[in-house]
Amino acid sequence: MKCLFKLSAVFFALFIGACSDRKTETNNLQEIVVIKDGKFYKNKLPYFIKGCNYWYGGYLAKIQDTTGHNRLKLELDFLSEQGINNVRVMVSSEGDSSYPYRIHPSLRPNLEQFDTTLFYGFDVLLTELHKRNMTATMVLGNNWEWSGGFGQYLEWHREQHGTSILPKTNTWDWNQFCDYLAQFYRCDFCKTNHQNTIHKILTRQNSIDKIPYTQHPAILAWELANEPRPMLASNWNNYKIWIQKTSEWIHQIDSNHLITTGQEGTISLFNDGQKFREIHSLKHIDYATIHIWPKTWNWYDGSSLASIADTTLDKTVAYIQAHAKICKEINKPLIIEEFGLHRDGNKFNPESSVQNRNVYYGLVLNEIKNSNLSGFNFWGAIALPENVNKEGFMKANSAYSADPPQEEQGLYGVYTSDSSTWELIRSFRPK
């Protein structure tokens, strides 16, 4: 009888534990953001994405790095106080330190290895975000070289595709770069190895809170890549098929979270609105994205005064409205997940004025409200004064900040001391 009683107690404890695990899993899934009638909802309440680009968020709190962990907590506290509820982070990074304008260390330094200390950093990030009721947009690749990106997979298959063509080197040529990078969508080796990276990320269980990434409530969405472009008009079908198949494959692994493209909009699709419509109408692309970079896209001559000229502002509003119209027609949410402007006088130091930037931010935020969009992520948080230097770019061993390695430090990043800009963001209310 005593043996039977002990067995019954053991089975009862196991039953209670299993029920508790299922309850926890159910609660986690209930917190995950969903889409209903073309809008985001979290915990059955409307959820407007009020976010920033915080690409380095997972790279701070490496194993046994208490300084990085403390910095992360302080920055997330600050962002939360400004009303930020979402951060867009670069998860996938590839390659070694041989190219100075690239993230290092990277998540995948070579084909045979993943950096487990960086995975731990993302575990910490998601855990800390969850504590603050914040979410992350998890970026799974990059069209550009500053995190390795698609070009690194081609480099790993150089016997078929040739040596990388990289900015800020003697071999740099935009047209040749387009030809080179377009090969990614035709390279089975590259796409398979990129999927291997994605699979490693998606199937991870958080080592701190023990929640599988596929069930983690702090994840808003999986983003196929940062600014994926077909690069060549002749590459359109390969590009579209890649988006379709990759989004379907991710959904098979994780049917809980949203999926998006990371697209810039028609500027990267040969100014063809129909192409934007096609890829964002795909079944497993849950919402649309656009980016807005008036200086990079030569919407003005680069001078500080012209940055807020009527023509620049008119182009910005027209760009937002054109994409908002398409998304309304396909009934999918639209997020402006990148936009920014340099400081006045094209300066980088925190003492310089941000009057023009504030005008531009105000215009974008106002149009987000007028066009009834679903959210934004400005670029970016958080700039570090100590990173500003005469050469402009990030120095070796510099702390990561809003402006990634290929851009001048302080170019688009918002310092914590930019109080007038933070007031604009903090006071914004959606329609």
Image (cartoon, rainbow, N blue to C red):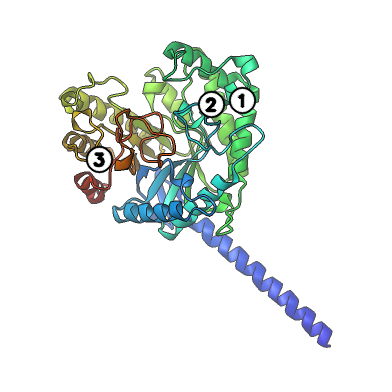
Residue 297: x, y in percent?
31, 21
Q: Are marks 2 and 1 in contact (CB under 8 Å)?
A: yes
**Of the image marks 1 and 3, the number of the one nearer the N terminus:** 1
Q: Measure how far apart labels 2 and 1 are at the Cα level.
A: 8 Å
Figure check: 229 above or below 334: above
Q: What secondary structure is found at the residue carrying circle 3?
A: helix
On screen, residue 415 above or below 171: below
Q: Residue furthest bottom?
A: 1
Taking the spot 53% from the left edge, 52% from the top edge, the residue there is 123
Q: Label 2 sits on what residue type?
A: Phe
Q: Is residue 257 left or right of residue 85?
A: right
Q: Label 3: which residue?
A: 365
Q: Nearer the viewer, residue 311 or 69?
A: 69
- Against 153, is 124 above or below? below
Work out whether residue 32 can be spotted: no
Please tell me which residue is depicted at 79% across the width and 79% down the height of the picture.
7
Label 2: which residue?
A: 150
Identify which residue is drawn at 23% across, 38% down: 361
User: Which circle marks residue 190 in the picture?
Assistant: 1
Q: Earlier in the sequence, mark 2 or mark 1?
A: 2
